[in-house]
Image (cartoon, coloured by chain):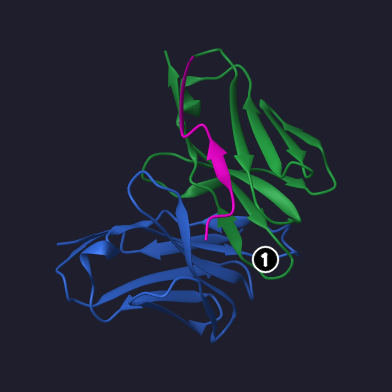
Chain colours: A green, B blue
């Protein structure tokens, strides 16, 4: 079953602009993570935010979490061509060890 | 450091043939292991996960099965492939709460059933 739903499904922006992707989920979580996938490759972990955190930064990445709305956002500032990839949110609950991914946002950075 | 290996990278199989995809993890012990499938341009679907040898949880009823014969080995199998089994299969490992719930992926296996 799909837990997270990313929005938008696809996003094209000019290099240098900021890219914002959103994720909504359905059940209570312990943490939410964002992953990146280059075309035809495995996923790479970007950042994790715990349920008691509201915002987290890592380099050009900024993640927010609103547990009351069951939503998260990933902001990539000053985008670069190399940021072109698909981005997925994933949720984890302590009831089991499953990690459930959303359908992803395909980000395309235009030169 | 921990590494994950997954093979074969690419596979073309006829309908009705068997399947075996293998995944091994090095540099850690008692990992949680996962198999995901990704259809073209789609999200990841969790197929199986395992928290220990011989412990397999199935998420989606289908003609696929998984086994964990050794602590760091996870195998995805099918006795008879269907066209709908085509996709990108990803193995992943993690350490659960101890590892911060982060999982690490292999490079994936492209399966085309013809």
Q: Position of residue B68 (x, y in %)?
A: 49, 81
Residue drawn at 69 percent across, 48 percent down: A32
Left or right side of B14 for B107: right
| Image quadrant containing the C terminus of chain A | top left
Q: Quadrant of residue A61?
A: top right
Left or right side of A5 for A42: left
Q: Position of residue A55 (x, y in %)?
A: 79, 34
Residue drawn at 62 percent across, 71 percent down: B31
Q: Which residues are magenta?
A: A1-14
Q: Which of the two residues, B63 or A81, is positioned nearer the viewer here?
A: B63
Q: Position of residue B92 (x, y in %)?
A: 52, 61
Element assignment for label 1: loop
Dot 1 crowding, Cα within 10 Å, few <14, some 14–19, many 20+? some
Left or right side of A45 for A12: left
> In this rendering, is residue B71 above or below B95?
below
> In this rendering, is residue B74 above or below A79?
below
Q: Quadrant of residue B61?
A: bottom left
Q: Is residue A2 magenta?
A: yes
Residue drawn at 79 percent across, 43 percent down: A68
Q: Which residue is mark 1?
A: B95
Parent chain of label 1: B
Residue drawn at 71 percent across, 45 percent down: A70
Examine the rendering and report whether any part of residue B110 can be seen: no
Examine the rendering and report whether any part of residue B19 can be seen: yes
Q: Position of residue B113 (x, y in %)?
A: 20, 63
């Amino acid at each position: 079953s799909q837990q997270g739903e990313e929005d938008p499904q696809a996003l094209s922006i000019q290099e240098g602009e900021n890219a914002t992707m959103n994720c909504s989920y359905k059940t209570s979580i312990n943490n939410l993570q964002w992953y990146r996938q280059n075309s035809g490759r495995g996923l790479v972990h970007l950042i994790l935010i715990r349920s008691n955190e509201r915002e987290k930064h890592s380099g050009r990445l900024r993640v927010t979490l609103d547990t009351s709305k069951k939503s998260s956002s990933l902001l990539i500032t000053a985008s670069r061509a190399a940021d072109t990839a698909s981005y997925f949110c994933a949720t984890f609950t302590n009831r089991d060890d499953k990690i459930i991914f959303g359908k992803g946002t395909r980000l395309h950075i235009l030169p | 450091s921990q590494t994950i290996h997954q093979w074969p990278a690419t596979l073309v199989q006829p309908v009705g043939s068997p399947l075996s995809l293998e995944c091994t993890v090095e540099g850690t012990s008692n990992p949680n292991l996962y198999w995901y499938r990704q259809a073209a341009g789609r999200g990841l679907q969790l197929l199986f996960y395992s928290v220990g040898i011989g412990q397999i949880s199935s998420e989606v009823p289908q003609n696929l099965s998984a086994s964990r014969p050794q602590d760091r080995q996870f195998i995805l199998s099918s006795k008879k492939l269907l066209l709908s089994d085509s996709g990108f299969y990803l193995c992943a490992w993690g350490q659960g709460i101890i590892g911060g719930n982060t999982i690490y992926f292999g490079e994936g296996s492209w399966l085309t059933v013809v």
